[in-house]
């Protein structure tokens, strides 16, 4: 009995251990409570946001790019609906994700929807293998922010409506598959005016880095807006060339977004219950881009295309001499911007690029403004004005043309033996010998000064494509190039538009427009107004004058009289190809290319490249000018034989269109007389 009342030694040991156990339990409880406090009180808002983001997805609503119309409302560039198929890798192929275990057993996963998608899209075995490899590469890790869940993969672009309907029909079987509506740029006239309009393309990495520098994602929303005002993101399309590039900020528009509820399988849910989960604001509507109204007449462009069909390469420019607005810009060979704008897929874009860059005629080059060529005899009116302005030549003085002239050891030739000619005849009959003597008297710098005053050898500032400045050389230019070894032959070549003289068709057209209107050199314009989608004018662009060329009216009249006889006098170079129903004045030109045939050249291409450039620059009606037309047929041969007929067709179609739009019959040719510049 007494032994029972005695304390046991092991009970004290237990009590000592119990204290430690209680302390350990208390500390564990404190840690748990502290962790719960951290999760719910300190970090609760952050985790609530993460949980919210897991069920709320912000879906981008694409904007509509502005429409481009011609002067009469015909659509030249718009957007059409296109449907792309995207997949979320981790949802469309759960079998690609790493295996997870619970209690030593693998966790069951949803079945793959990939086989059904491949069947609906009619993917071939090679395509299936390619996309499966991309999915497995994305799902090496299936953490919440891994590409497995947050980087959609584009499977098909611009699928047909039948496939879209089939995908909608099998929506419940295709977890992780999204059909995304994307507007695609569409050019209804295809290659007509392609260089002028340009095309859109996916934004390149260099441009994207400019607007989204390193650390961009960490910036505040206001700072992001300042750095990237147009909201460029990877995969966006931007204007690549032409008006699409130059007027990108007007055409682009602003994307919108919409918040949607998704379930664990990534499927969108709707209904009153889901609407309560979406916080305000639930949506921001996209803002469409502004529309552009051009000064271009697409029907006149079509007429130029018909007139240029017999020729492989060239350019044509039509400008309103009263305003400087461009009515037509045509460059050949051209391309279909629909092939380059990505609507038919990247394979078609690559194919189009490869084909065009392999073409020796360089279809990507805008020959109206990006290519500079020797102008040939179309330069002669400016050489004549240089002599008349400084009173260093007598317009009634005659020179005898025997078909050539010798300077030093070189023979400079004329196209014919013209006999005795004065200035008027030298322009009308295009006598080189007369202008060789004129150049010797007038000098290079005087000719250069007048040519530059009319805008030759200088960019026009149109700005829709890179402009070649061309070249109007001076004595100082030759002094730098040839280190003081200046030759008289340089001036002789310059006077007839050969040698180192180069101009663009756009420069020449604006220069002849200035001759026609009395000396006003306008800034060429192609966009007439910016409009809203309902046609309201936001901003209109009035004509802009670059300068008033300081030329005496009497001297300008002498030149325009001679240009009239180029076409209308039986001895004029353009007379055989004239249209008797038209009142046209202008100047022909045949420019040597200086191409040297190489042994490795293809025979046909070498023959083509060795042919002269054919020019005709003109204005009409000669008695009351409205338009200036410049035609270049590259490697076409003779200007009078090749370029003049093209220009006559253009003028004829212009007058026909004007008459139809005014509701009257085409007017007859003006009575014989000497034209003068418009007052």
Image (cartoon, grey):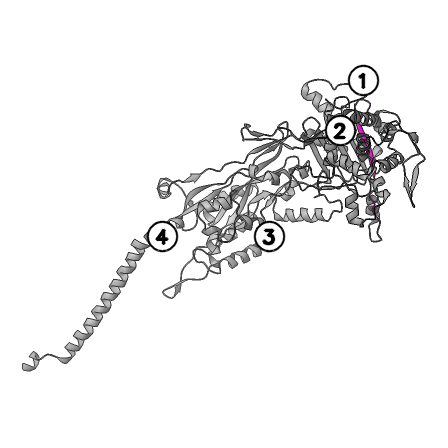
Q: Are marks 3 and 2 in contact (CB under 8 Å)?
A: no
- Closer to us: mark 1 or mark 4? 1
- Closer to us: mark 3 or mark 2? 2
Q: Image point 31% across, 54% down: which residue?
A: 42
Q: Secondary structure at mark 4?
A: helix
Pinpoint residue 109: horizontal percent, then vertical percent: 43, 57
Comparing 55 with 447, the one in front is 447
Q: Secondary structure at mark 1?
A: loop
Real-space CA distance between mark 2 and mark 4, rounded to the nearest whole angstrom: 76 Å
Q: Are marks 2 and 4 in contact (CB under 8 Å)?
A: no
* Residue receiving disc 2: 551
Task: Quadrant for the N terminus, please.
Answer: bottom left
* Residue receiving disc 3: 124
**Neighbours of disc 1 within 10 Å: few (<14), some (14-19), many (20+):** few
* Residue receiving disc 1: 671
Task: Inspect the magenta stretch and tell me whether residue 498 lies in it.
Answer: no
Real-space CA distance between mark 4 and mark 3, rounded to the nearest whole angstrom: 45 Å
User: In this view, which residue lies farthest toward the front?
Assistant: 391
Real-space CA distance between mark 3 and mark 1, rounded to the nearest whole angstrom: 72 Å
| Residue 103 visible in the picture | yes
**Neighbours of disc 4 within 10 Å: few (<14), some (14-19), many (20+):** few
Q: Secondary structure at mark 3?
A: loop
Residue stretch rendered in magenta on the structure = 578-600
- Closer to us: mark 2 or mark 1? 2
Pinpoint residue 472: horizontal percent, then vertical percent: 76, 40
- Closer to us: mark 2 or mark 4? 2
| Residue 496 visible in the picture | no
Earlier residue among tags 3 and 1: 3
User: In this view, which residue lies farthest toward the bottom?
Assistant: 3
Earlier residue among tags 3 and 2: 3
């Amino acid at each position: 009995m007494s032994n029972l009342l005695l304390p046991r030694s092991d009970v004290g040991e237990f009590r000592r251990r119990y204290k430690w156990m209680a302390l350990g339990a208390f500390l564990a409880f404190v840690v748990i409570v502290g962790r719960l406090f951290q999760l719910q009180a300190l970090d609760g808002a952050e985790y609530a946001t993460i949980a919210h983001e897991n069920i709320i997805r912000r879906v981008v609503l694409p904007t509509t790019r502005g429409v481009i119309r011609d002067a009469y409302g015909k659509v030249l560039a718009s957007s059409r609906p296109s449907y792309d198929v995207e997949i979320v890798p981790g949802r469309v192929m759960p079998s690609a994700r790493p295996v997870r275990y619970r209690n030593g057993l693998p966790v069951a996963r949803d079945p793959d929807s990939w086989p059904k998608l491949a069947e609906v899209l009619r993917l071939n075995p090679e395509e299936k293998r390619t996309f499966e490899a991309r999915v497995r590469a994305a799902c090496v890790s299936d953490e919440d922010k891994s590409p497995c869940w947050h980087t959609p993969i584009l499977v098909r672009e611009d699928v047909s409506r039948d496939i879209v309907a089939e995908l909608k029909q099998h929506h419940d079987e295709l977890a992780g598959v999204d059909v995304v509506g994307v507007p695609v740029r569409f050019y209804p006239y295809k290659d007509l005016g392609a260089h002028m309009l340009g095309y859109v393309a996916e934004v390149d990495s260099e441009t994207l880095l400019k607007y989204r520098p390193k650390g961009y994602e960490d910036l505040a929303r206001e700072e992001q807006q300042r750095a990237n005002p147009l909201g460029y993101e990877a995969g966006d399309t931007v204007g690549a060339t032409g008006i699409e590039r130059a007027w990108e900020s007007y055409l682009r528009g602003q994307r919108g977004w919409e918040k949607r509820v998704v379930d664990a399988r990534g499927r969108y849910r709707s209904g009153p219950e889901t609407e309560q989960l979406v916080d305000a604001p639930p949506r921001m509507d996209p803002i469409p881009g502004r529309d552009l109204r051009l000064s271009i007449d697409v029907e006149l462009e079509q007429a130029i295309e018909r007139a240029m069909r017999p020729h492989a390469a060239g350019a044509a420019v039509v400008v309103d001499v009263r305003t400087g607005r461009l009515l037509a810009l045509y460059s050949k060979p051209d391309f279909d911007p629909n092939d380059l704008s990505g609507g038919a897929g990247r394979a078609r874009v690559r194919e189009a690029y490869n084909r065009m860059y392999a073409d020796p005629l360089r279809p990507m080059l805008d020959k109206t403004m990006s290519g500079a060529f020797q102008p040939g005899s179309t330069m002669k009116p400016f050489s004549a004005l240089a002599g008349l302005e400084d009173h260093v030549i007598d317009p009634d003085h005659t020179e005898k043309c025997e078909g050539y002239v010798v300077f030093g050891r070189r023979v400079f030739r004329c196209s014919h033996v013209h006999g005795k000619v004065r200035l008027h005849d030298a322009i009308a009959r295009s006598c080189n010998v007369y202008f060789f003597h004129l150049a010797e008297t007038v000098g290079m710098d005087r000719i250069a000064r007048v040519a530059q005053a009319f805008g030759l050898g200088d960019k026009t500032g149109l700005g829709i494509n890179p402009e070649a400045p061309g070249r109007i050389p001076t004595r100082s230019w030759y002094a730098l190039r040839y280190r003081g070894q200046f030759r008289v032959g340089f001036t002789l070549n310059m006077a007839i538009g050969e040698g180192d003289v180069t101009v663009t068709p756009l420069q020449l057209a604006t220069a002849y427009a200035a001759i026609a209107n009395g000396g006003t050199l306008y800034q060429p314009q192609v966009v007439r107004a910016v409009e809203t989608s309902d046609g309201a004018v936001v901003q209109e662009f009035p004509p802009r004058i670059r300068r008033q060329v300081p030329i005496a009216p009497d001297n300008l009249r002498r030149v325009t009289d001679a240009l009239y006889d180029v076409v209308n006098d039986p001895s004029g170079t353009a007379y055989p190809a004239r249209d008797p129903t038209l009142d046209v004045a202008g100047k022909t030109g045949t420019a040597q290319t200086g191409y040297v045939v190489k042994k490795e050249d293809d025979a046909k291409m070498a023959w083509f490249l060795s042919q002269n450039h054919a020019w005709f620059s003109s204005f009409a009606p000669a008695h009351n000018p409205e338009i200036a037309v410049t035609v270049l047929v590259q490697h076409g041969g003779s200007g009078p034989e090749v370029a003049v007929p093209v220009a006559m067709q253009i003028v004829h179609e212009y007058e026909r269109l004007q008459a139809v739009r005014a509701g009257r019959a085409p007017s007859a040719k003006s009575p014989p007389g000497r034209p003068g510049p418009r007052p």
